[in-house]
Image (tube, grey):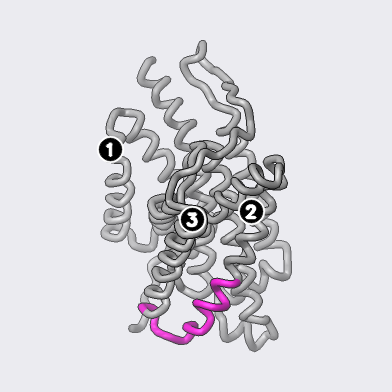
Amino acid sequence: MEDLLIFLQQLINGISLGSIYALIALGYTMVYGIIKLINFAHGDIYMVGAYVGFFAITKLNMSFIPALLTSMVLCSILGIIIERMAYKPLRNATRIAALITAIGVSLLLEYGGMLIVTPQPRAFPEVFPQTKISFFEGKVYMTNQQLVIFAVTLILMVLLQFIVYKTKTGKAMRAVSFDKDAALLMGININNTISATFAIGSALAAAAGVLVGIYYTSISPLMGIIPGLKAFVAAVLGGIGIIPGAVVGGFLMGIIEALVSGYGASTWRDAVAFGILILILIIKPSGIFGANIREKV
């Protein structure tokens, strides 16, 4: 019974952590689905989102929802600027050139952030009072922060599904993802569609940054490196370029990491995450939801 309670507690923790990974992974998978680019700067947009939320709450005295929306809007604009300035000129270049540029943008955001906000970690303000919802006589519990994280993630994922499947922008995104040249012939504005994809992905990463600030109460300019890489692993695990795969991969990553930590091997949690990436690339490189497609090189 004791083992079952530990498992249930770590499952709750894993779902909360997995919600964060899923939001970040969605940005990776959407961009890759459109232009076949691994945007390694995406984890640092998540960091910028956390800082925008921090300053919105501490300096502008905003409550949680306005701060979250402000962070999402500003980071979506940042995503568009990065796409137009860094990636658009390299759209017809080799993939390695675009990949190196993405790493350069990542470093620019990290060390530019350190220059602007200093390298010292900052304590994120307590937006919600600490309360717990207890089960099994208090042996298993869920905090209100975890509940907010899961609720916001669920709302954003439903909104993303609506955008992708029910709006003109979403239809354009799916068309460009399927066949860019055919979409262009049908009158779809490729540049605007790609920018919209970056904007939506960056907004989701910003939301994840604010939620992490609330959950862990600490932010720093280098906070996006490891979560960004783990979210990339989650996207590959689910099937890079497939939206439901990013969600499932994110939740699986969070649950696996929480279980590893909960059973006394917290120092191994990062190694396990990247070990999963190696196994996926060996066993099923297309991911859980992906199909193996032969490409001409």
Q: Residue at x 49, y 65 (%)?
A: 241
Quickly name the residue at label 3.
Answer: 25
Q: Secondary structure at mark 1?
A: helix
Of 127 and 90, nearer the camera is 127
Q: Which residues are magenta?
A: 81-96
Q: Residue at x 62, y 48 (%)?
A: 55
Query: Residue 31: percent from the left, percent from the top?
Result: 52, 68
Quickly name the residue at label 2.
Answer: 71
The image shows residue 12, relative to residue 22, as above or below, that is: above
Q: Secondary structure at mark 2?
A: helix
Q: Is residue 145 left or right of residue 253?
A: right
* Residue count near mark 1 (Cα–Cα under 10 Å), binned few <14, some 14–19, many ≥20: few
Query: Residue 261: percent from the left, percent from the top?
Result: 34, 33
Amino acid on which the number 3 mark rests in the picture: Ala
Query: Residue 152: percent from the left, percent from the top?
Result: 63, 43
Q: Decide which of tag 2 and tag 1 comes sooner along the chain.
A: 2
Mark whose residue sits in front, 2 or 1: 2
Marks 3 and 2 in Cβ contact (< 8 Å): no
Label 2 to label 1: alpha-carbon separation: 32 Å
The image shows residue 202, relative to residue 94, as above or below, that is: above
Q: Residue 267: which disc?
A: 1
Q: Residue at x 71, y 43 (%)?
A: 62
Q: Decide which of tag 3 and tag 2 comes sooner along the chain.
A: 3
SS assignment for the magenta stretch, majority: helix
